[in-house]
Image (cartoon, helix red, strand yellow):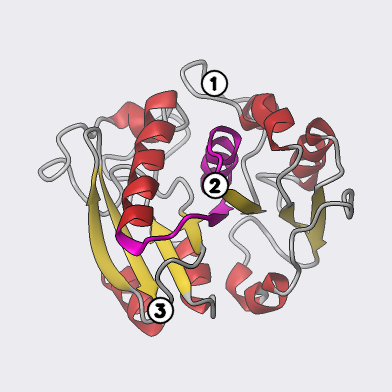
């Protein structure tokens, strides 16, 4: 926890717990312009598994990549949301069970709970529009949220887990029938400006994943940016200020 707190402090982000009927979410927020759009960062899967066959008892990330990116974002309104059960243990989060960070981590109830948390943040800040940024599994969550919400200005993913079935087949791991697959919702994102950043050296979520996804969106508002030298873990923070200057726009689709 200390590492995350230090990162948040460096980014002038303040901790707030957001309660929903399903889960309590840890957030770190910097709100300097109430009523203006929020840029919301969604964390990756964290320590979901200890080994290929053994799930973790605590999914809190050892390296909170999305938090590192949020802390660097110079925007006026920046919000980081941890995934269910990250940082907040079962004692404070009775709904937390292993499936919610393994095979059900992209289930409808998880996406709906995160959407409810965003609604509360919007209400407290008087914001009406949001920009989503998701890292790895957080990219899957961000895409699924964008597919069902009406207030999304843009979507950025970083090493996004955008085609669950394809990635799981690629790595010969079990399918996740209880989770939603973002690529199956991609057509609903056809008019949302989006950039999907892929690491050229990422062997976990290969660049082909993002390319497959934008083909399903129709390409007109989505593009893939291949980032040289980046693996799945990055280090993405070394490039983030530069990458943030690239604005998602419609009419500039493709690679």
Separation of disc 3 and disc 1 at Cα?
44 Å
- Residue 154 on the magenta span: no
Q: Which mark is residue 174?
A: 1
Q: CA distance from mark 2 to mark 3?
A: 20 Å
Evaluate if marks 1 and 2 touch, with contact meaning CB atoms under 8 Å apart. Answer: no
Answer few, some or many: residues within 10 Å of disc 1's Cα (few below 14, many 20 plus, some between 14 and 19). few
User: Is 131 a magenta residue?
Assistant: yes
Q: Which mark is residue 32?
A: 3
In the picture as drawn, the residue positioned furthest to the left comes out as 91
Which tag, 1 or 2, sits closer to the chain's start? Answer: 2
Q: Which mark is residue 152?
A: none
Point 48% across, 34% down: residue: 52
Q: Which residues are magenta?
A: 124-151
- Circle 3 packing at 10 Å, graded few (<14), some (14-19), many (20+), is few
**Residue at label 2?**
151
Residue under the image location 54 percent in, 47 percent down: 151
CB within 8 Å, label 2 to label 3:
no
On the picture, is 104 further left or further right than 75?
A: left
Mark closer to the observer (3, 1)? 3
Number of labelled discs? 3
254 is higher (above) or lower (below) than 239:
above
**Secondary structure beneath label 2:** loop
**Percent position of residue 240, x then y:** 64, 73
Answer above or below: position of 219 versus 12: above
Looking at the rendered structure, the secondary structure element under dot 3 is loop
Q: x and y percent of residue 11 in the render? A: 41, 80
Q: Residue at x 28, y 43 (%)?
A: 85
Q: Position of residue 221 (x, y in %)?
A: 81, 47
Indicate the position of residue 148 as horizontal and vertical percent values: 54, 33
Pick whichever of labels 2 and 3 is earlier in the sequence: 3
């Amino acid at each position: 926890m200390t590492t995350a707190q230090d990162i948040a402090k460096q980014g002038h982000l303040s901790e707030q717990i957001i309660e929903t009927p399903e889960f309590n979410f840890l957030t770190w927020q910097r709100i300097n312009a109430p009523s203006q759009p929020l840029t919301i960062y969604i964390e990756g899967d964290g320590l979901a598994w200890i080994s290929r066959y053994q799930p973790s008892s605590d999914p809190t990330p050892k390296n909170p990549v999305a938090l590192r990116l949020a802390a660097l974002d110079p925007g006026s309104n920046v919000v980081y949301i941890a995934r269910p059960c990250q940082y907040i243990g079962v004692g404070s989060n009775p709904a937390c069970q292993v499936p919610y960070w393994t095979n059900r981590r992209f289930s409808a109830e998880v996406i709906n709970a995160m959407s409810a948390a965003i609604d509360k943040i919007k209400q407290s800040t008087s914001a009406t529009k949001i920009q989503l940024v998701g890292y790895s599994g957080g990219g899957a969550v961000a895409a699924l949220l964008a597919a069902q919400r009406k207030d999304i200005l843009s979507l950025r993913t970083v090493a996004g887990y955008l085609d669950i079935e394809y990635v799981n087949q690629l790595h010969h791991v079990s399918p996740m029938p209880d989770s939603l697959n973002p690529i199956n919702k991609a057509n609903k994102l056809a008019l949302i400006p989006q950039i999907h950043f892929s690491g050229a050296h990422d062997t976990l979520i290969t660049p082909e994943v993002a390319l497959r996804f934008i083909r399903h969106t129709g390409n007109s508002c989505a593009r893939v940016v291949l980032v040289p030298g980046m693996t799945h873990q990055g280090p993405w923070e070394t490039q983030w200020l530069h990458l943030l200057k690239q604005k998602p726009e419609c009419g500039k689709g493709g690679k």
